[in-house]
Amino acid sequence: MFRSYSYQMYEMVHAALAPARAVTDATHFVFRNPWNPLSNTAIGKNISAVAELFERMTRRYGKPTFGLDEIEVDGALHPILEDVVWSRPFCNLLHFVRPDFPHAEDQPKLLIVAPMSGHYATLLRGTVEALLPYCDIYITDWTDARLVPLAVGAFDLDDYIDYVRLILDHLGPGVHTLGVCQPAVPLLAAVAIMEAAGDPNVPSSMTLMGGPIDTRRSPTEVNKLAERRGVEWFRRNVLHTVPFPYPGVGREVYPGFLQLSGFMAMNLDRHVNAHLEMFNHLVEGDGDSAEKHRDFYDEYLAVMDMDAAFYMQTIDKVFVQHQLPKGELMHRGQVVDCSAIRRCGLMTVEGERDDIAGVGQTQAAHDLCSNIPESMKLHYLQLEVGHYGIFNGSRFRNEIVPRMRQFWAMIDGKPAKAIPSAKVLSAKKPNGAKKTTADKAVLVSA
């Protein structure tokens, strides 16, 4: 009974805190106003910092935007436009259009399959930002399940695989694909099914990063929890019904607020320390450090609901039964045979300190794809990075991206062209500082 109404209780608590948020927001404004003589005093700074932290910790964070506006190449600015080129109820395919960008016709077309694991596709903003000067990028923008009407039907792992296949058919042959974390399994399965069917739109390559291909290798606490609890425990404890007035009222989901609780609990001490540091930065007037904190948590605290069918199938088939590496994964009555893949290159990337997908879990794809020629395979272990460092941050930009570009160029049989002095310019904030995500992972590493 309690589980049935916990989503409603969460909504009621959020609504009940609305007046307190309004008061603290006004207090923060008053004590930050330079015309207030108390704004420069110790007590004024402390009151302002407490008010801001309370408002941020009780706020609901909406879906972020990518905010990538321009690419600067040798002093010349080239606009970036977002265009939805394919749409289904649970996903939009975004294309980052670069009009008049130099050498665009010689650059690879890249499909980034973003994870459906609680956060929005904008969590990969740093990934997109680092690759935009070198690729024609498309990315899956998954829909918050609570916004999808129940009449549309459920969304499960089979549907996810179907969506990837439909997107690849839409983009046509010659596409390179990038699966970050959770999508590694459905992307690999989709390509295997396409190869078995002789589909002409099989992608040129797959790059799988920190994905749970075989979680029996170097199991992490996340993997052990799934096996220890079992499927029924998750069914009883984490699934809830979307309440009114959301469009998806009545849909069974794994709610974003529960996912966020799990994310935070994994590294609670780091999150507490990060907020304490932000408080100190606000009191000391260190605006730059406080702004980095705001940027990171604006993204990190924005979460979405997942359809219960997809979540439960992923837990069961990927983390408990290990069906893909065992050769037992079925898609609509057909066995997913990764050995059928012959025409698609395979690159895997892992992080030495990854505590989500342990070392060896993604590399397992090479054993499964036994008929891909060795000349079309590459594995890379990035030292001294955790899970987020695989696809974001300085090591990703400086060490992983060049290897990915070289791999794609090798698959295409042509050299990777250099783009001198290329830089992506993000949307500006009111204070004039450009919004970047390259160093967000320094605050919290899940």
Image (tube, grey):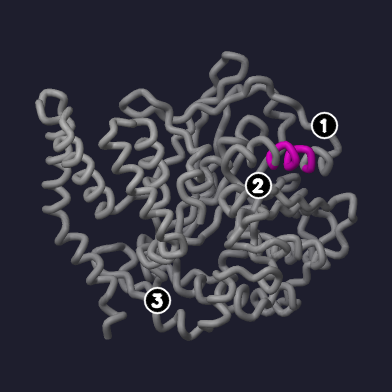
Residue 148: in sight, yes or no?
no
Please indicate whether residue 311 sits to the left or right of residue 146 in the image: right
Against 362, residue 113 (above or below) is: above
Cα gap from disc 2 to disc 3, whole angstroms: 35 Å
Magenta region, residue range: 400-407
Identify the residue at horizontal 45%, vertical 69% (top origin). 307
Cα gap from disc 3 to disc 1, whole angstroms: 49 Å
Against 384, residue 80 (above or below) is: above
Image quarter of the N terminus: bottom left
| Kind of residue at badge 3 | Leu
Identify the residue at horizontal 19%, vertical 39% (top origin). 48
Q: Residues within 10 Å of mark 3 (few under 14, many from 20)?
A: many
Q: Nearer the viewer, residue 394 or 184?
A: 394
Q: Disc 3 marks which residue?
A: 239
Q: Position of residue 445 (x, y in %)?
A: 51, 52
Q: Disc 1 marks which residue?
A: 415
Against 399, residue 192 (above or below) is: below
Q: Position of residue 134 (x, y in %)?
A: 67, 32
Q: Position of residue 52 (x, y in %)?
A: 23, 43
Please indicate whether residue 185 sits to the left or right of residue 380 in the image: left
Magenta span includes 441: no
Looking at the rendered structure, the secondary structure element under dot 3 is loop
Q: Residues within 10 Å of mark 1 (few under 14, many from 20)?
A: some
Q: Position of residue 410 (x, y in %)?
A: 84, 40
- Frontmost of labels 1 and 2 is 1
Q: Residues within 10 Å of mark 2 (few under 14, many from 20)?
A: some
Cα gap from disc 1 to disc 2, whole angstroms: 23 Å
Q: Disc 2 marks which residue?
A: 171
Quarter-of-image position of residue 226: bottom right
